[in-house]
Image (spheres, rainbow, N blue to C red):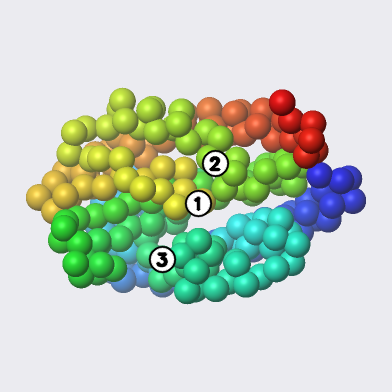
Amino acid sequence: MKTSTKTKVSTVLANAVDAAPRVLDFSCSARSLAWGNRPLGIELFRNACIQALEVPTIFLMDAFYRNAGEMRSVTDPQNAASLVSEFLNAEGYSFPWGYLIETRLDLIDPKTKYPGSLHWRFVPLELWLSEVDTVAGSPLSIPEQLAAVEEDVFWTIFRNSPDYLVPAERRAHDLFALMSFREDNDRARGWIADKLLPNILPPILEHVRGALRIVASVQIPPPGMQH
């Protein structure tokens, strides 16, 4: 990436820090929860107090500048690969580290073979908001950087997950995704709240942070010079 372009991207992404995701509304009252000393986000998740979530600004900025200002591929809701489509009607939970997007499969696909099953997408945001220079300096977009660490994250989650949670297809900005079947939803939610979110996810995010700095430092050779 040329220095001028890097500076431009860095400036725009830095502005996105001030536009970090905001919770739009709650479907149940946080005041009714007795969470004690436990993090509010985890208790909202445990009680399925789902929230409407916005498209993260830093993703919009990254996609816009890496697509040379061409917004159709970013904003077209009919394009399954577009950023807006990826977060269209997204609901879930907002944490200091990012989003946990929750979807009941039969609500988006009435013909699904798994009615009542839940699909959870883990979308890191703080990782990018705190590493603006790394994001801007990388020749790779955020989805490309995530793809570079996908395998390591997959196997870490797979080794630590109970058998009633299965790896699921992730979208471009997801770190990973999990699915539980209807009969296992309650205990899967409990395990995510008690084990994954407080104990397993934080070291994964720190490992990914270090790996992404290495990925960002690798320069892609120009066409004709690759071996």
| Residue lying at 46% horizontally and 65% vertically, measured from the top left | 80
Location of residue 172 with respect to 21 vertically, above or below: above
Is the residue 27 above or below the residue 219 in the image? below
Residue underneath mark 2: 146
For image coordinates 13% across by 46% down, the residue present is 184
Residue 16 visible here: no
Estimate the x, y position of residue 21 in percent, counting from the top left.
Answer: 55, 61
Judged left or right of residue 152, residue 32 is: left
Q: Which mark is residue 90?
A: 3
Count the marks: how many?
3
Q: Mark 3: which amino acid? A: Ala
Task: Give the residue drawn at x 54%, y 63%.
Answer: 83
The circle drawn on residue 69 is none
- Identify the disc placed on residue 172: 1
**Percent of width and height locating residue 111:** 19, 67
Q: Quadrant of the N terminus?
A: top right
The quadrant where residue 145 appears: top right
Q: Secondary structure at mark 3?
A: loop
